[in-house]
Amino acid sequence: MGSKRKEVFVSILTVISILGVAISVMVLDAALAIMTGFELELQDKLVSSQAHILVRRYGGSLSDWPSLVKKIEEIPEAKSVFPYTYHQAMVSMRGQAQGVLVRGVANTSGAKEKLAEIVKPSSSIDTLFSPAAVEIYRPDGETDEVQLPPILVGKSLAEKFGLYPGAVISMLGSQVSAGPFGLSPRVGRFVVVGIYSSGLTEFESSLVYTSMESGQKFFSEGEQVSGVEVSVSDVFHAPEIAQKVLAYLGGDRSGYHVVDWTVPNKPLWDALQMEKTVYYVVLLLLILVASFSIVSTMVMIVMEKSADIAVLKVMGATDRSVLSIFLFQGLVIGSLGTGLGTLLGYVFCVLFRLYGFPIDPKVFSLETVPVRIDSMNFILVAISGFVITSLAGIYPAFRASRIRPAEVLRFG
């Protein structure tokens, strides 16, 4: 009776060990899926808000940009090529002021398609290329209808200033002009024709869009542009395509500076990868802790089966055969735990993605926790779990192989 109770107890411990490994693997799979989801969501937002590849001239603006655009369009990987302008300014309304970057958008299909990724509805983009008529009150109380250049502002900036489509804001340029009262900054008025939402508060509060013609006129750029933007189909190959563009333009001595979207965001990606690695290592300790239960379970099995092991050795079993038996048992426990954990992790991620977990959209710019099921993450976790749990069976197996039949049978 006592022997049967011990066997039942050992069986329960074996089940607990399998469940411990399974839960640890499931948690690690779920954590990596969520972190990968956040990483890809941030990447999508950055790619939609930034240019894939920028081509600029060292030390100044581009005046010969039409020929440059035609030349870059000859590269097969270039999906669309269009010019842009970029200037610093300050916007003010109702006594509030804030520094912004003013990006001039070219009236081309490629530039519109890129801007449509963050502007909803996309039909409001067309209003960016025609002056908007607004009524301005005169000091005598009468109103005049004037044509003002259009501007698109970010959601965060609109909330801060209380802006809405049709609102008029003042803009102060970085250039100064001489007048009868000395030097004064360039001042102009723009009318808000739309509000964009990129999901990135930093961009929404500091970046505004206007037509390239309006930007050139306000900042007295003439026909010059700040650079040329290149959109590509595969954003993950943007670094290689950027090097190809630079080589096609003449290399480092061409006077052009070519940069892809990964360069300014490299510190952010490095930080995300480091955080993901740390999470992986820390959560991997859960599997290591669970493997200790495998060690204790197998040690109890060895103690329970010591007499049987002694009989096997008397009948001719070698130390290596006994070692392989218990190593195989450890592999079975580890494999069952890892396999069950991988299955539970996949089911958990599918359900989590299907039903979602609500979060504050003002903080994360998302309504639910993003989950990305990456097969490589699951494979990596499964291999790590299998290796750790397999190593856990070495000590009990070695102890079983060192049992001496004479000592066990004498005192058994």
Image (spheres, rainbow, N blue to C red):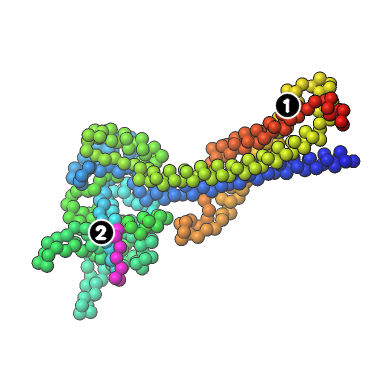
Residue 113 image point, x, y percent: 35, 49
Residue at 41 percent across and 47 percent down: it is: 268
Range covered by the magenta-colored residues: 94-100
Instruction: Give the mark nearest the N terminus, 2 or 1.
Output: 2
Residue type at tag 1: Leu
Specify whether residue 18 is in view.
Answer: no
Residue 264 image point, x, y percent: 35, 45
C-alpha distance separating marks 2 and 1: 76 Å
Q: Mark 2 highlights which residue?
A: 89
Query: As drawn, is 6 to the left or to the right of 122?
Result: right
Residue type at tag 2: Ala
Residue 386 image point, x, y percent: 63, 35
Residue at 58 percent across and 44 percent down: it is: 283
Query: As drawn, is 154 to the left or to the right of 366?
Result: left
**Looking at the image, which is closer to me, 412 or 87?**
412
Label of residue 323 in the image:
1
Residue 70 position (above or below residue 90): above
